[in-house]
Image (cartoon, coloured by chain):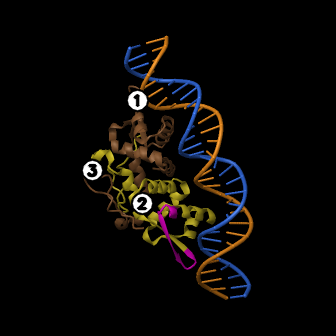
Chain colours: A yellow, B brown, C orange, D blue
Amino acid sequence: METIDAVAALAALAQDNRLDVFRLLVQAGPEGLAAGAVAERLALAPNTLSFHFDRLRQAGLVTVRREGRSLIYVARFETMNALLLYLTENCCGGDASACAPTICQPKGAPRGKKAKVNA
Amino acid sequence: METIDAVAALAALAQDNRLDVFRLLVQAGPEGLAAGAVAERLALAPNTLSFHFDRLRQAGLVTVRREGRSLIYVARFETMNALLLYLTENCCGGDASACAPTICQPKGAPRGKKAKVNA
DNA sequence: GTCTTATTTCAATATTCGTTGAATTATGGA
DNA sequence: TCCATAATTCAACGAATATTGAAATAAGAC
């Protein structure tokens, strides 16, 4: 991943509504969610949501497919993972002891504990 | 991590110069880097860099300590990791098969291959 | 004290961003 | 065809952002 792509992805996620949308799609998985369903769940105006979907799509974070008269949006995990890798690239100059979370675990495992922010 | 904190961290990283600064600090590890060293490496005006450091600091992504007349900036891995966990929380509704990169590996391991973006 | 280095603060500017409202396109049903 | 649903596009507004140049603060050397 190039810097310019990472900035685009980060900028796309750096907005509360878009972050909510993306996380909803991440949790929805490969099946995705219809635009209307997202609008209802997050209580967003359809045109506003359209604007945000477009940002996420341009950043490569989601894809769309049509199903009847609904547009189904799906998170792109490849881009998300590429971004995570980019952020942590060569962390600590190679000594990962100070910076190694385990991400994307199955549902049951508690995952907020390991990387506790202490300030 | 709360949504508001995640947005703050993402916004802080969603700028090319700040992203470069942060990644430089991530690679520098716990020892950190002096502001001047960062300015030199990235060819940034000192006041511009000051502005960006402040953003990173307010987002909890870096800390500072003084050493002589230099200010040493250090990446905060706890925040970074909390952000990564927040992004991937409950991904795929619990089925991590479609979305599981391994991040923050030691230097030798090649890490850009697993999450290849195919478009 | 004065001088130099290191970094921050302040004010000003152009640019970008998010939301709203109205109008428009696209699909499917009667 | 006519109508309803689903979503997008367009124009406009106030708010936030990144950079620049000049001035100020902090620490150490002489």
Residue A65 falls inside the magenta stretch: yes
The three-letter code of the residue at mark 2 reads Met
Please identify the quadrant where the C terminus of chain B is shown.
bottom left
> How busy is the neighbourhood of tag 3: few (under 14 within 10 Å), some, or many (20 plus)?
some
* Residue drawn at (48%, 35%) of the image: B46
Name the side, left or right, on which A45 lies relative to B46.
right
The percent coordinates of residue B100 (x first, y second) are 35, 62
> How busy is the neighbourhood of tag 2: few (under 14 within 10 Å), some, or many (20 plus)?
many
Cα separation, mark 3 vs mark 1, equals: 28 Å
Numbered disc total: 3
The percent coordinates of residue B56 (x first, y second) are 47, 42
Cα separation, mark 2 vs mark 1, equals: 36 Å
Q: Which mark is residue A109?
A: none
Task: Read off the residue under disc 1.
Answer: B70
Q: Are marks 3 and 1 on the same chain?
A: yes
Secondary element at image label 2 = helix
Q: Which mark is residue A80?
A: 2
Q: Are marks 2 and 3 in contact (CB under 8 Å)?
A: no
* Residue situated in front as seen by the camera: B61 or B109: B109
Q: Which residues are magenta?
A: A56-70
Cα separation, mark 2 vs mark 3, equals: 21 Å
Subunit bearing disc 1:
B
Task: Read off the residue under disc 3.
Answer: B107
* Residue drawn at (41%, 58%) of the image: B88
The percent coordinates of residue A30 (x first, y second) are 43, 70
Name the side, left or right, on which B62 lies relative to A16.
left
* Residue drawn at (47%, 63%) of the image: A60
Name the side, left or right, on which A94 lies relative to B83.
left
